[in-house]
Every structure is written in C-alpha cells, then in structure tokens.
Image (cartoon, rainbow, N blue to C red):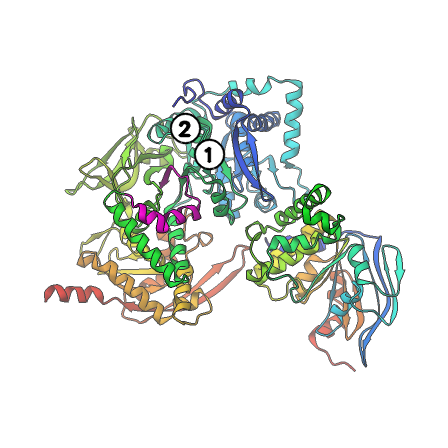
Amino acid sequence: MAYPDPAVYDTLPKLLKYNADHHGSEVALRQKDFGIWHETTWAEYNGKVARIALALRKRGVGKGDVVTLIGDSDVNWVSFEIAAQAAGAMTVGIYRDALEDEVGYLAEYAGVKVAYAEDQEQVDKFLSLMERVPSLELIVYADPRGMRKRDDARLMELDDLLAEGEDILTHDGEAYGALIGEASGDDIAILCTTSGTTSNPKLAMLPHGNFVRHVHRYLEADPKDSTDEYVSVLPAPWIMEQVYCFGFGLVSRMKVNFPEGEQTAFQDLREIGPTFLLLAPRVLEQIAADMRARMMDASSLNHWLFDKGLKIAVDAVEKNQKSTLADMMVMGALRDRFGFARVRSAATGGAAMGPDTFKLFLAMGVPLKQLYGQTETLGAYTLQTGGELDVDTVGVPFSDVEVRIENPDPDGVGEIVTRHPDMFTGYFRNEEATAADLRDGWMHTGDAGFFDTKGRLTVIDRLKDIAETSGGVKFSPQYIENKLKFSPYVGEAMILGAGRDYLTAIICIRFSISSRWAEKNRIGFTSYTGLSAEPRMYDLIRGEIEKVNADLPENQRIRRFLLLYKELDADDGELTRTRKVRRGVVEDRYGQLIEALYSDVSTAHLDTEVVFEDGRRTRVQADMPVQDVTAGAAGEMRKAG
Amino acid sequence: MAPDDMQTAGSVHRRLFDEAILKIENVELGFGGVKAINDVSFDVNKGEIRAIIGPNGAGKSSMLNVINGFYKPQAGWITFNGQRMQSMEPHFAASSGIARTFQNIALFRGMSTLDNLMTGRLLKMKTNFFAQCFYFGAAKREELENRAFVENIIDFLEIQAIRRIPVGRLPYGLQKRVELGRALAMEPKILLLDEPMAGMNVEEKQDMSRFILDVNEEFGTTIVLIEHDMGVVMDISDRVVVLDYGSKIADGTPDDVRSDQRVIDAYLGATHD
C-alpha cells in the first residue's frame, strides 16, 4: 500500500491538500442530512478547510493559539479542526454532552481563543462562561437556529466565516498553500483530553508528525485504502476517533461517513455497510443484550433457530472454524440486520469485554480484534493478530513499539510501560503530571498486565484499583465487575472490599433487558427505581452473582450486594464521558450504602442531594434492600463434602 | 435548556408588534343554554406568540374552534388577513394559512411520521390524482419538493430517528411533536396550539417550549396557544388573554396579567358572586 510519504506530508492539512491535488474528485466524506447522503469530495473538503483556515488566520489565529470544538462529529467539525490546525493552532475537542462546568474548566485551562460550537445549545455553554474565559475572542456556530436573539459581538456563523475565506482566496489563490507550508511536523496539532477517571482531564500534546507516523504504524498492522468505508459513531474528541477520522481518512483515504444523528446512527450504519468498525465494548454488549431482549418476544420456532444457530456458530468459533450451516440459519441474517455484512476489519477496546459477547460477534462473522492504547501514546499500539480465538489478550505491539512490564510479581504481573518514537510530548501546561507519567521516555500507563507465553499482552485493571482486603487477599475489582456485566441483566457493577473483611457489590440493573424479563414474568413495576427494589429482581441478580462466584477463588467471592435505585450517570459525575466508573465519586456519594453493605442491616438508607443540569438541587432519600449471597457458602460446603 | 433561557423571549426582549393578523370582535357562542363564549374581543398581531389561558371550561378550546371554523359563533365578527366575516369556514381557514394541533392528538396512527407530515402538504399539491398515480413529470417534481419541505421540518423538530415509525407506536411526547410537524407542513400563517404541553414531563415541556419559540423565530409564524401551565405561558408568550366562564377577564403582557386581581381570583378559586 503506497501511502503519502510521512516525511513530506507530515501535517494533516498537507495530507488533505495532497489528496485534493491527486484525487480531487474522489469522495472523501459522506454525511446524511434531510434523509439523504451528501457526498464531499477531497477537493471540496480541502476547499472548505482552506476558506476557514484563511479566515481564522486573518482574524489573528496563529501558532500557539488554542481552538476548541464542541458538537456532533460531522463534516463541519472535521473541516474546522483541520482548518484550525492549518492556521497554526492546536485543537481541543470537547465531548458534546459535557456540562458548562467541564467546558469552562477545559476552555479556561487551555486558554482557548476560538471556539467552534455546533448549535445554540453548545454556544450557550460558552456565552455563560465569558467572564471565566477572557481569552475567548470568537465563537463560530454552524447551525443558526435559535441564534437570532444572541447578540454577542464574538458570535459568528460558519457560513460568514467561509465567505471571508472565499474573499481571501479570490484575491490570492496561493494563500492557502503558503499558509500550510509554514507548519512542520513538530508543531502540536491536537491537545487530546485524557479520560480522567480520577481527576479533571489532562491535555496530551500530540504533534502533527507523530500523529501521522503513528497512523502509518497502525495501518501497517491493519491496512486500509480508498475502498474502505467507516461510519463515525464515536465521539470526535476521543483519540481513536481522531486516529480514524483524520489519520486513516487522510493517510489511507478511507471514506468517513457521518450519520444523521445520534439516534439514527445504527440505521445509517446499516445503509453504508462499513468495511471497518470500532465499537466500544459497552456498545457491543448493548447490541448483544438488545438482541437477546428481542428474542424473548420471538416465536418459539425463531427462538429455536436462533439458539441452535448461535450454538453451532459459537462452537465452530471455539474450534477456530466457521459454520456455513449456522450462517444460513441465522448468522448471515443477523450480520446483515446490523449492517456488518461488508465488515473486513473490526476493533474494540477501551475496556474489557465479556468472552460470550466477543464470541457472539465472531460467530456472526465480524472479525473482531481487541486493541489497547492510551491517549498519550496516540491511541492503540497493540492489536490482536487474528487467526486463532483469543478472548483474553489485547494482542501484540505494532512495529517499533516497545512494551515491558515494570516490577513484575512472581506471576509476571506488573505495570505496563511503553514507548515508541511518536508518543505525546507532554501534558499541556502540566509539567508535573508529564514528569510523573513520562519517565526516561517511557509512558507509565498505570495499568496492570502481563505477557503470555506467545508474547501477547493481557491487561488486568488499573494498577491503583487492584485492591487488598483486610485479610490480605489481592483482587481486581474490574475483573469481577466485568464478569458480572456479562450477565444481560447487569448494566453496571461496582465491587468493594478494599480494607474490608469481604467483597460486596453495588449493582445497577440493565433496564432494557430487566424490564422485558419482568414483563415476561408478570412482575408489575413503574420505574427503574421500582424494578430495582423488586424482590424477584433481587433473586434473579443473586442467581447471576452466584454464577460468577462459582468461578472465583473462595476469598474473592461476593458476599453481599444491593441494587442501586438509579443508573450511574456521566452527568452526575459518576461515569467518565467514555463511561468508565469513577470509583472515588461513587464511593463518596454512596458511603451510606457501603456502610450498610458491611453491617448486618437488611436495608440501606440513602439520603443525598442531587443537582440537576440546570443547577436546581433536590434531596433524594431512598431505601434499598441489602441481601446476602449464599452460593459462596454453599460452594464451600460442597467442597467440604 | 435553562429556565431563564425561556424568559429571554418573554420578558427581557420585549418585542413590539402592531399589525393585527386576526381580530376577534364581540364573539358569542352558546350550546343550548350554556354560554361558552360571552362577548369576547381580542386581536392577534402578526409574528407574536399569543396565549389564551383560563381555568377548566373557560371557553379556551371553543375559542380556537371558532377561529378555525369548527364552530360558528352566534354573534360577532372575525377579521383574518383584512377579511371581515361572521364565521370562518374550515376549508377557508386551512387554505388561507390557519393550522392547528389538538388537545387529544389527531394523527393517522397507522401511518409513519413521514407520511403523517406529508398529509400536511396535501393542500399544497396542485397536480391531479391521475398524474400522481403514475408519478411522472409535474407530479413527481411536486412530490420531491414537498418531501424536501417535510425533511426540513423533520430536521427542525429533530425527529429523524422516527421518520419511518408508525406514530401509534411513539411515546406521547413525540406524537405531540409529530402533530406540530404536520401543522408546520401546511406553512401556516397562524398556528393554533391546543394545550401543546398537556401531559408532558418537565423535560418534554422544555423541549416543546424551545420548538415553539424556534418556530416563531425561524419561520415568523404567528402562534396562538392554549396552555394550562402558567409558568410556560408566562415564559414564552408576548401577550396573554385570560378567559373565565366564557368571558374575557384580562388581556395584556404576562407581567400585567400575572398581577391582575381578577386573574388571581379565577386561578385561586375566589368565590363568584
């Protein structure tokens, strides 16, 4: 595969211009709007970027400035991001559902000069922050709806900015070429937010050249070309989406498709039939869970076909084979139903995934591979090689990537440290954190893991999350939580036990499946809270815990649990925007529940205050039953007998 | 969306309108011995959001029905677009740009969202039945134009995800939105909304308020709405007329109406003598 030479085309704008010059009429992007897919060619893409970049430069944006973006990922977003980089600025993407406070923190911290805010909802976040972020000079919005009443002088519509750029181009056709010629591969392109399970996000500085070269390294392990189709369903600020939308898109000319909206994403995905996918484990688990939920309503014949077909297919997968029979029975139809019919390569990562779900997708003919990486290392640097069934590891490192285990214990488990020539150059305005994570050129990931005999890396948990009970038993909460989450009825789980005598669990039921189950079993309920308190729901979940307990060493079994009255929510700070549990926040907020789990009461009482999105506060009081899990004890007895 | 956001439209940016698009003069309507509307007069200016409020049975829905021709008043005059008449004919109301939504949703439940919205375009279709059957030439062009128009509304109301779903399967709040969409598809000059937020939760009400404000702002549509939720009414309307037992008891800006003693009595249930 001949990709543009990274030594020459070492910035994203240069790559875009290269594609526009050599493949100008080829489709680069598609976006569904008003029910129709609209195509953007490389020439149009580059033209749009050139206009925005020139207008931004005229308005004083240059090297060292920071431009932030918030909204849905679409053609405007990607154009604006590359344009800002072409003008010399560094870009910070903010998750579209971030609340004002989070936006304020990032904008203030980064000293943002220009903001791209998709619509009125996003613009308002900046308008109310004006005093906090005095550096902000210009807010560009794409969707004028609801904006007429906003009369802030810093507001500008994207179309007007484009017209300004158009003016400059008509006077000087070479202006854009000269502008992007200024930049070198060493300039910082992206300030990428880290996920921040423990603290406010940090901003990893990613230079153009490093980004481009690491993308080449990734493409070596998983090649793409202009016949590849990708559907952008991940949030744009996430490092992997940056790698795919910009890296893969610009280097390999893989086509990037933007769905009409968040809710239509899967419908639109099916229309495109992508050849390459990255879906987070929780999305895959949601798909699998919804599928099972729908099968609950199917006729008995369909049910039988599904179960039988699935079993044959999974059996085949376990023997590294493929079953044509199962494919004809059900798997082919499923593959088509979800829009996976043309998938040639699929990846998942960011969190562990249940082996059953993993096998299900393999059985469906989706060649799913796990990858592993961090924002700081420009995303993935290990990938499964495929070939044989491997549900545990994240595969082998890319070429030129060194990974070692620091201070391994006798089992070979220790901190994963890594380096390659093109990592981040430090955290923006945070030398202290840089020095802590980047020592002698090695990135200390903070993850615990080990290499298996075949040289494949296995990731266990965050190093600091590996806990010890008061009896000195080491355990990984995440490992047990993941096992629990393989149950379709469990949405989220949090294992406790550090410094305590035994392990307990706070569990959030998965409402979509559990409600279906309740209806099926004629259990009346009115809400999530109601169903969570239902005794038969408790029985069901206890059964699921008992199954997990059976696979765990005796001293790591869950002894007591309760079902939380609400789902954990990123807006309440309980999850990160990439939906990882913020352990500290949860432990803090639900301290009363945790105390109840470690006493002999049968009801946990919670009295807390919640803050709504609009700032209103309300007191919440809830009672949740606490139950013992007996299977552990029963298991012991069986063993004894 | 924060509540203070809505206030910007109502109280902070006080807007001025002076051209009446609809004038109700001394209208009376009775059913047998019951006087549903008793000598009510008010006007609606072009481009404003006008609310009609009042306790149950005050005659609010009857008033809307008079405006769009469902009911023929026994006395009084209606002036619409400079045309003065004693009663409105429903087809005249529809074809001259008065669209409405209903308190109890009136959609084609078995039809998709898209098809329901397309029915809103029927009055705009000029080609004949046969041309439409064969779908060629002008009929095809017309269909495409109308579809494009409807897609704009779908985008505007953010209902892309339910484009193909039969409306009977949609939750209540979304059905209300589809109904608003169908009314918008008629490109109305005046939009009559009969309790657009009845039965909604806070979040749905906020969404609906936003849409109403946006419709008014983006398309310049004059809006007459009946609503029970005083908070919402005061936040989004330019002027409010208050009915009680079929009679007008107050008329003015939300602030005026809010402080009017008769309104307070009507709402708090002071004794009538």
Query: What element does badge 1 sit on?
Result: helix
Residue B261, can we see it? Answer: no
**Residue denoted by label 2:** A211
Label 2 packing within 10 angstroms: few (<14), some (14-19), many (20+): many
Could you tell me residue A574's position as x and y percent? 41, 53
The answer for which chain carries disc 2 is A
Q: Amino acid at mark 1?
A: Cys
Do marks 2 and 1 share a chain?
A: yes
What quarter of the picture does the C terminus of chain B occupy? bottom right
Question: Which mark is nearer the camera, 2 or 1?
Answer: 1
Could you tell me residue A179's position as x and y percent? 55, 20
Residues shaded magenta: A322-348
Residue A424, above or below A622: above
Residue A175, above or below A114: above
Q: Amino acid at mark 2?
A: Phe
Residue A244 is covered by the magenta coloring: no
**Residue denoted by label 1:** A245
Measured in 3D between alpha carbons, the distance from the residue under mark 2 to the one under mark 1, in whole angstroms, is 12 Å
Could you tell me residue A562's position as x and y percent? 33, 65
In the picture, measured across the screen, residue A376 lies left or right of residue B14, that is left
Residue A327 is covered by the magenta coloring: yes
Q: Quadrant of residue A490?
A: bottom left
Q: Quadrant of residue A621?
A: bottom left
| Residue at position x 76%, y 68% in the image | B242
| Number of marks present in the image shown | 2
Query: What element does badge 2 sit on?
Result: helix
